[in-house]
Amino acid sequence: MKKSTRVNHPPQVDVPAGNRPVVAPIYQTVKFEFETVDDTLRALSGEQPGFYYLRSSNPTTRALELTLAELQGRDDCLVCASGVGAIAQTLLALTRQGDHVLCFLESYGPTRFLIRRTLARFGVSHTLLSIGDLAGIEASLAARPTRLVIFESPTNPINRVADIGAITRLAREHGALTLLDNTFAGLHQHGQFPVDIYLHSLTKFASGHGDVMGGAVIGNAALIATLRPDFSTLGGVLDPHAAFLLQRGLKTYFVRYRTQCASAQRIAEFLASHPAVERTHYPGLPGAPGHALARAQMSEFGAVVSFDVRAGAQSAGRVAEALQLFAMAASLGATDSLVLPPQLLASRDLNDEQQRQAGMAAGTVRLSIGLEDVDDLIEDLRAALAAAHQP
Ligand SMILES: Cc1ncc(COP(=O)(O)O)c(C=O)c1O
């Protein structure tokens, strides 16, 4: 074999049976081969196990899918290149011209964009309600056939808690699918409800380190099987190296998530008693509107704390700038704490009245709590709130 041939056909090193690597290797390959045409065809039709092309599956991405499905308490999962990719591909796979979907003011902005702009172009209509408006949800479902209800809990950015039991019950009664973006609640919560599809941005708590993007769609095998061909063709596939990093992130997920939630609770309590803060939005606070519901349906209350600075937007912006330990940056769920002031948080697709209904105030600030010492974070907030309020 000439050297130029050898470098394209390197020697294969097989690991002997009984000599497994402790950390699963990364299958950084797009293609898999079989010896025969028949074996290839059998694998493609699902008659025999095997991999063919990364856009459909790969052992590294598949291992991540199986882990995530188990965490969420369902049997199957599809991973994709980002959380938004997971939402977009699911919406495109599940809807057709003439369908109607129900969505909410209190949700991640790009989710509304996908429904109100992208799906609208393909003849899918929508109703936009507030997540606490159960009467409105029931009336909307009764008024017209609805393909799906897509919602979050707690909601981005102000942590409203959806009544998941009531929403899933109403949707089932009216033949609509439920899609829960469970990113804020984490990968292990809300499995007790009959939600049809859980959506996650893996970029947040699964990655945990702010260095890799991914998304997941989790549900029962039959429903995931109907999505699989669309996902393979829409093509927003997760790279195996990203899947490896996400799988590695999951090893510390529970330790990180629970520590971050405990710190978030203490920070929410500090903010709730601070004179410069008008309202604190955290479901773990006994006085929070969603507290009883959150206690009934969650084991932890999340690592995002939002609060309204009494003096309004400019002052809130100064608080964000004055913070030393919170980076002013998008995203959440990583080991480092982050802050977003109202200027960077407000949803541009909502008018002032809709922003108000969604609970956003002029001075709403969102914090994502990381793994720094919580006393240091509280001191940083105390100093920033004081600095921003000096005359
Ligand atoms: C609730 C929620 N869903 C989805 C996403 C989108 O995730 P990604 O950034 O991985 O596309 C985000 C991102 O902030 C989010 O907060």
Image (cartoon, grey):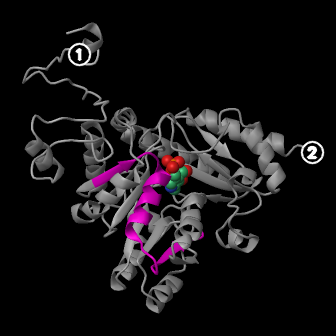
Regarding residue 121, the answer to whether it shows in the image is yes
Q: Is residue 94 magenta?
A: yes
Residue 1, picture quadrant: top left
Q: Is residue 340 above or below residue 154?
A: above
Q: In the displayed orientation, state which residue is furthest to the bottom.
A: 143
Residue 197, picture quadrant: bottom left
Classify the position of the C terminus by image quarter. Answer: top right
Q: Is residue 294 magenta?
A: no
Q: In the displayed orientation, state which residue is furthest to the front.
A: 2
**At numbered mark 2, what does the secondary structure look like: helix, strand or loop?**
loop
Regarding residue 106, the answer to whether it shows in the image is no
Report x, y in % for residue 202. Answer: 43, 46
Q: Which residues are magenta?
A: 77-105
Instruction: Give the amino acid type for the residue marked by disc 1 in the picture.
Output: Pro
Report x, y in % for residue 14. Answer: 13, 20
Q: Which numbered marker is on residue 10?
A: 1
Instruction: Give the amino acid type for the residue marked by disc 2 in the picture.
Output: Pro
Query: Which is nearer the N-term, disc 1 or disc 2?
Result: 1
Residue wearing tag 2? 391
Of the residues tagged 1 and 2, which is closer to the observer? 1
Report x, y in % for residue 172. Answer: 34, 80
Q: In the displayed orientation, state which residue is furthest to the right.
A: 391
